[in-house]
Image (cartoon, grey):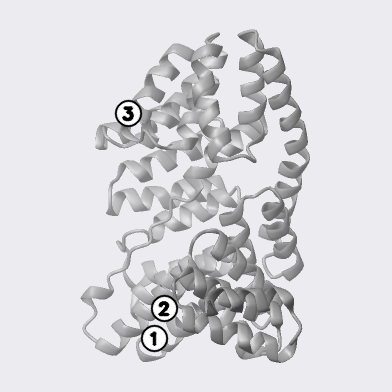
């Protein structure tokens, strides 16, 4: 049951305020630096983001926007103590800065510091009342076992914004745990009406229907989850259970067996994730996490883990290459090109990188660039038949 609960709550943990007020900064140089730091951060260049933010701080150490940005970057790196110090500087400079108390609360939840989380979320509510913050307060109370307080929090979130889907889904989760399945289904339906493509909500709805003795209705929901997240243990397990209950035993066995195969990988990922978050400066923990995620085809998460590893060892060519390859798999050809070029600036003799760079250029219609890349590769390995074939293809 713990695995099911942790999957559902994961989406709440990414509720981090991301905006800053750089458009209102009067100094154009500082505004430019913040924009550059923000761009670097969004691109996964975390060290660059911190370095640029530090340059901006040297020009004005009393600007809360800069400290807020640093807090976000440090959070991404799981350096929670440093992130909290950055956010505390924000609120020392501007007690009502939107998102600072909220982000501190979310980091507290990640570290299981629940009373501190509630305190910080309440400070956010005083300055900027929102359904999002109220849901997080409810989540914290739920983790403490204070279910009445959690219920009141979720209901208040819906009163603040009756179109906020997480409020209904959290309320549904609470009702399910209380055994009030029909009410849970009603609330989940409202959440899905507001966010019909949310795959986490679809999984939860399927679980409720299966629990309510409606396996036939649950199957389409689980089908969508396993297609979108082929690594999802519980979706495969529950789909197998649902199929068995409707008499489709052969199909049921396929999904049950797949779930068994996935279970080891899921546990491995969680073990490495916990170790990495507890020891954020340990390079190999992030590498192992990235490899485990990649083995389960959780490509975006794997890339995120390797990006943290790269922040620890920025000159590591192998990690940079992994990230470039994953960017390519995710369809981000621009990021792949930039990262391949970065690798070659460090070591121009790596044939595979020249080859991959050529492939990306060719797939983007940049024939001349592709030709140049493959010709460079042939300088180091003149008899490489694969690259010769690539060149023959574009030279026809």
Residue receiving disc 3? 193
Q: Residue 87: x percent and y percent?
A: 44, 67
Q: Residue 390: x percent and y percent?
A: 61, 74
Q: Residue at x 41, y 15 (%)?
A: 183
Q: Residue at x 55, y 36 (%)?
A: 227
Residue 112 visible: yes
Q: CA distance from mark 2 to mark 1?
A: 9 Å
Q: Residue 343: x percent and y percent?
A: 63, 83
Q: Secondary structure at mark 2?
A: helix
Q: Secondary structure at mark 3?
A: helix
Residue receiving disc 2? 37
Position of 278 relative to 230 (above/below): below
Q: Which mark is residue 56?
A: 1
- Lateral position of residue 68 relative to residue 48, left or right: left
Q: Nearer the viewer, residue 103 or 94?
A: 103
Q: Earlier in the sequence, mark 3 or mark 2?
A: 2
> Which marked residue is nearer to the observer: mark 3 or mark 2?
3
């Amino acid at each position: 049951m713990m695995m099911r609960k942790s999957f559902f709550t994961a989406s709440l943990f990414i509720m981090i305020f991301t905006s800053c007020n750089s458009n209102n900064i009067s100094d154009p140089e500082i505004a430019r630096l913040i924009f550059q730091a923000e761009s670097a951060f969004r691109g996964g260049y975390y060290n660059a983001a911190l370095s640029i933010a530090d340059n901006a701080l040297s020009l004005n150490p009393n600007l809360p926007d800069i400290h807020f940005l640093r807090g976000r970057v440090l959070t991404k790196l799981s350096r929670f103590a440093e992130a909290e110090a950055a956010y505390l500087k924000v609120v020392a400079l501007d007690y009502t800065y939107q998102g600072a108390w909220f982000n501190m609360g979310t980091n507290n939840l990640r570290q299981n510091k629940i009373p501190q989380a509630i305190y910080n979320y309440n400070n956010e509510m005083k300055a900027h009342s929102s359904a999002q913050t109220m849901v997080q307060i409810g989540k914290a109370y739920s983790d403490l076992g204070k279910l009445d307080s959690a219920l009141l929090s979720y209901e208040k979130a819906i009163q603040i914004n009756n179109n906020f889907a997480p409020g209904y889904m959290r309320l549904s989760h609470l009702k399910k745990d209380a055994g009030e399945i029909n009410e849970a289904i009603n609330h989940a339906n409202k959440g899905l009406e507001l966010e019909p493509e949310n795959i986490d909500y679809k999984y939860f709805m399927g679980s409720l229907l299966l629990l309510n003795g409606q396996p036939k209705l649950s199957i389409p929901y689980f089908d969508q989850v396993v297609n979108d997240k082929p690594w999802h243990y519980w979706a495969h397990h529950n789909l197998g259970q649902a199929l068995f209950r409707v008499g489709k035993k052969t199909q049921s066995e396929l999904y049950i067996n797949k779930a068994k195969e996935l279970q080891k990988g899921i546990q491995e990922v969680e073990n490495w994730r916990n170790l990495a978050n507890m020891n954020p400066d340990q390079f190999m923990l992030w590498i192992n996490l990235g490899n485990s995620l990649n083995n389960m085809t959780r490509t975006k998460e794997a890339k995120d883990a390797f990006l943290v590893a790269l922040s620890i060892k920025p000159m590591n060519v192998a990690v940079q290459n992994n990230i470039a390859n994953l960017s390519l798999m995710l369809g981000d050809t621009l990021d792949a090109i930039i990262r391949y070029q970065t690798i070659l600036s460090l070591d121009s003799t790596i044939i595979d990188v020249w080859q991959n760079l050529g492939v990306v250029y060719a797939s983007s219609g940049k024939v001349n660039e592709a030709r140049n890349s493959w010709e460079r590769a042939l300088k180091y390995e003149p008899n490489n038949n694969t690259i010769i074939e690539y060149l023959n293809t574009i030279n026809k």
